[in-house]
Image (cartoon, grey):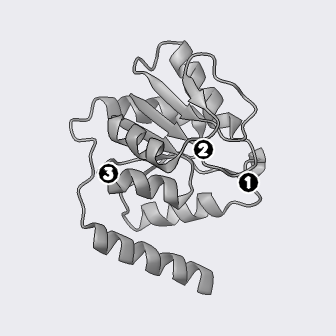
Amino acid sequence: MIFVTVGTHEQPFNRLIRKIDILKGQNKIMDDVFIQIGYSTYIPKYCQYKRFISQSKMECLIKMSTIVITHGGPSSFIEALKQGKMPIVIPRQKKFNEHVNNHQLLFCKELQKRGFPIKVVISENDLYEVINDMQYTENKKFHSNNKRFNQELDALVKNMFNS
């Protein structure tokens, strides 16, 4: 199963939901797909979905999933990491009216540059290739020292806001 979450930000993230739904409809994604669509206005035709889910439901869906795709909000991709999954992260972008600025994009690029275990996808057109690579990669799990990761992430966030 593939789990997709767009979080609870009030701006739609139709670009991600539409792309996943199209890939599923074209049978390019053969796995079951569940999408948490939030305030998005695009309604999936080929995937299961709910607007919002509880934290415990999200944890359960992540646990059941072979692939986790999230927006660029840290709490979503950190939850995947906590469960040993390497998330595909597609940051919301201001130019698509998905957020008020590009902080998700900048933050995710910085994390990736520093070697944090997330697969950042900037364009939805690259999603199929990344998903396909993840499906055929033997080790989709990330094994790390969570304490060190959280300390480094906390320091990075503090440093970014103090700059």
Foreground: 86 or 136? 86
Reading the chain from its start, which is encountered first: label 1 or label 3? 3
Residue at figure coordinates x 24%, y 62% from the top left: 144
Is residue 86 among what the camera can see? Answer: yes
- Asked if residue 69 lies left or right of residue 64, the reply is right
* Disc nearer the start of the sequence (2/3): 2
Percent from the top left, x then y, of residue 83? Answer: 32, 51
Q: Secondary structure at mark 3?
A: loop
Task: Give left or right: position of 13 versus 59.
Answer: right
| Figure quadrant of residue 163 | bottom right
**Which residue is tagged 1?**
99
- Residue at the image position 51 percent from the left and 18 percent from the top: 24
Return the residue nearer the eye: 63 or 95: 63
Amino acid type of the residue that numbered disc 2 sits on in the rendered structure:
Val
Q: In the image, what residue type sits under mark 3?
A: Gln
Residue 42 lies, in percent from the top left, at: 72, 28
Residue 90, relative to residue 129: is it above or below? below
Residue 117 badge: none
- Amino acid type at circle 1 is His
Judge whether 99 appears above or below 64 on screen: below
Q: 78 or 111, which is in the foreground?
A: 78
Residue behind mark 3:
83
In the rendered image of this protein, does residue 120 appear above or below residue 27? Answer: below
From the top left corner, tell me how far across and down residue 2 is, in percent: 42, 31
Which residue bears the numbered disc 2?
A: 6
Query: Dot 2: few (<14), some (14–19), or many (≥20) neighbours within 10 Å?
Result: many
Left or right? Give the position of 102 relative to 107: right
Marks 2 and 3 sit apart, C-alpha to C-alpha, by 18 Å
In front of the other: 60 or 32: 60
